Image (cartoon, rainbow, N blue to C red):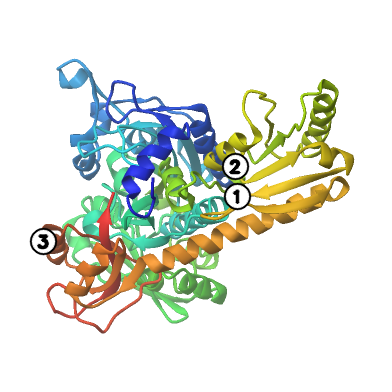
Amino acid sequence: MDKNRNFSEWYNEIIRSADIIDDRYPIKGMPVYKPYGFKLVRNIIRNLEKELEKFNIEPAWFPALIHYNIFKKESEHIKGFESEVFWVGGKDEASEYVLRPTSETEMYYMYPLWIKSYSDLPIKLYMTNTVYRYETKATKPLIRGREVLWNEAHTGHSTKEDAERMINDSIKIYTKIFWEICSVPFVWTVRPSWDKFAGADYTKAADTILPDGRFLQIGTTHLLGQNFSKAFGIYFNDKHPFLSKDRKNEIEIKMKNVPEEVRNKIDDYDLIAFSKDYKKVVIIKILGNRAKIKIITKEGIEEKEINVEYNENKISDKISTGYREYELNYIYGRLEENERLIESLKSLINLEEFDNRKMIWQISFGLAMRSLAAVISIHGDNKGLVLPFPIAPIQIVIIPIYYSSEKEEKERILEYCEKVRNYLDEYRVYLDKDDSKTPGWKFNYYEFKGVPIRIEIGKKEVEENSVTVSVRRRNERSKKYYVKIEELKEKIRDIVEEYDKYLKEEAIKYFKEKIVKTNNISELTKIIEENKVGKIPFCMSEECAKELKERYSLDIKGYDINPEKTNERCIVCGKEGKYWVYVGRSY
């Protein structure tokens, strides 16, 4: 099969012939993952789990069944998934269950039982599991299925700033897996509002581009905000009662209990606190290095002013994250946790009178077996798989070569092969002793399976205390090295490093050629016909996105995390463009 001429045929052939999957199981979208394919997926997931645990995200397990009454609690979330769920149980709604399409609702049902105080936060959990979605589009193994093996992480935080720091950490984690481990090139984008995860404030996604010019989403991270906290009543008792104005959900809930004559006196603020009986409200406005305080009751307003000290490092930290829209709330450090400010307030008000219950901020992020589809699609060639060294089930294969049928010679070569295998025990090494296949057949077979390094050992190598090392190359002959046994360990390390560098260089060259900037719609259609994607000036309106979808079957994928602004006109409506965005066909 020619990968560049007919990618779809090539992909369908290789995932079956290379023992990745067997889709003869009689349920659409639920293939069997054969040992070689499952080891590949597992090696990606194991690397991911190690990275998650470096960030103190811990493994957990929740049931596969979610009661419908739990699932429907967050209205926007259920709207996004209800048409896709597998239903389990009887007809009566109270007895119906769904197989988890994702785990937010089942996990967050438990959070109010576990989280009571600020000392219980942050909560950081991950789960490697299967999720089930009644996929109505055409299914494609590893890319779009009804049963998906993936890893999802869920974290809860006391402040929005902590949650957004975790968003940045999730991006670092996934970037390491996709690029450093899998050598898959990709872009991080901010999804447009109409394409965010159901129930999230915003979504950021990692997209790669397959040889047929289609985007493949390989990972996502979502700021869920307080939407699920509100739906599931996830509160904690904080050190103090002040809420920053970005906590709109809980301020809105508490404001409903405030008498109208008190509520009408509230004006602009950065922080707000409510007494437990809601008859007193304290608001704080930060003005330079001063805090203007108003204590509001139905009797009147008492005004005070105190000095505020702030941490200049926090300002630069905040600016560097790129979240400038939230900068104002935190320009003087983390206002909700400014200990000096709170200490100063203690002399003005009795903090124990005030309600310190707050909702947590949440994020979730997920990575599925699609990452393996990207590995296969981007690195593979017409000879078969080409696998990154860290995830290859067989990193090194040893092939004995016999030039005679003498038993003594074969035993000597095999004994030497065993010695080399033991010498390289830090790697996943396979010694192929099968006498029924020729060395030439084995060379082709292990190239097809994507094994990065092949070691050939015959009579000559045994006599000279050496090995012949061949390294898999894309679309060309293997690169060979003749290595003395005493130098083998060091040489293999060098070869692994060189192989990793080579894969990355090839991948990034391929990826850059796949993205073309244009401000012309006719040029864009030509770019798409050439199996590439466009980067276009766009006004960010959903109406223009719908027109692109309806007329050209193209999807707006979003803009870069550090947005590239544009002075160009929107390619669709001709109005002022906002960002350069990625556009193309998608899986």
Q: Say which amino acid is labelled 1.
A: Arg
Answer whether labels 2 and 1 touch (C-beta < 8 Å). Answer: yes
Q: Say which amino acid is labelled 2.
A: Val
Quarter of the figure with the N terminus? top left
Q: Which residue is mark 2?
A: 451
- Name the residue rendered at 37%, 44% in the picture: 10
Provide residue 139's location: percent of width, then percent of height: 27, 37
Dot 2 falls on a residue whose secondary structure is loop
Instruction: Tell which of 81 and 404 is nearer to you.
Output: 404
Marks 2/1: CA–CA distance: 7 Å
Q: Which residue is mark 3?
A: 551
Mark 2 / mark 3, whichever is N-terminal: 2
Provide residue 256's location: percent of width, then percent of height: 20, 52
- Name the residue rendered at 76%, 36% in the picture: 425
Marks 2/3: CA–CA distance: 44 Å
Marks 1/3: CA–CA distance: 43 Å
Give neighbour class at mark 1: few <14, some 14-19, many 20+ (Cα, 10 Å).
many
Dot 1 falls on a residue whose secondary structure is loop
Mark 2 / mark 1, whichever is N-terminal: 2
In the image, 138: left or right of 91?
right
Q: Which residue is mark 1?
A: 472
Disc ID at residue 223: none
Answer whether labels 2 and 3 touch (C-beta < 8 Å). Answer: no
Extreme-front residue of the structure: 404
Q: Say which amino acid is labelled 3.
A: Arg
Provide residue 65's location: percent of width, then percent of height: 33, 24
- Name the residue rendered at 16%, 22% in the picture: 93
Of circles 2 and 3, the one toward us is 2
**One can see residue 471 in this view:** yes
Q: Is residue 341 above or below residue 466?
A: below
Instruction: Tell which of 509 and 40 is nearer to you.
Output: 509
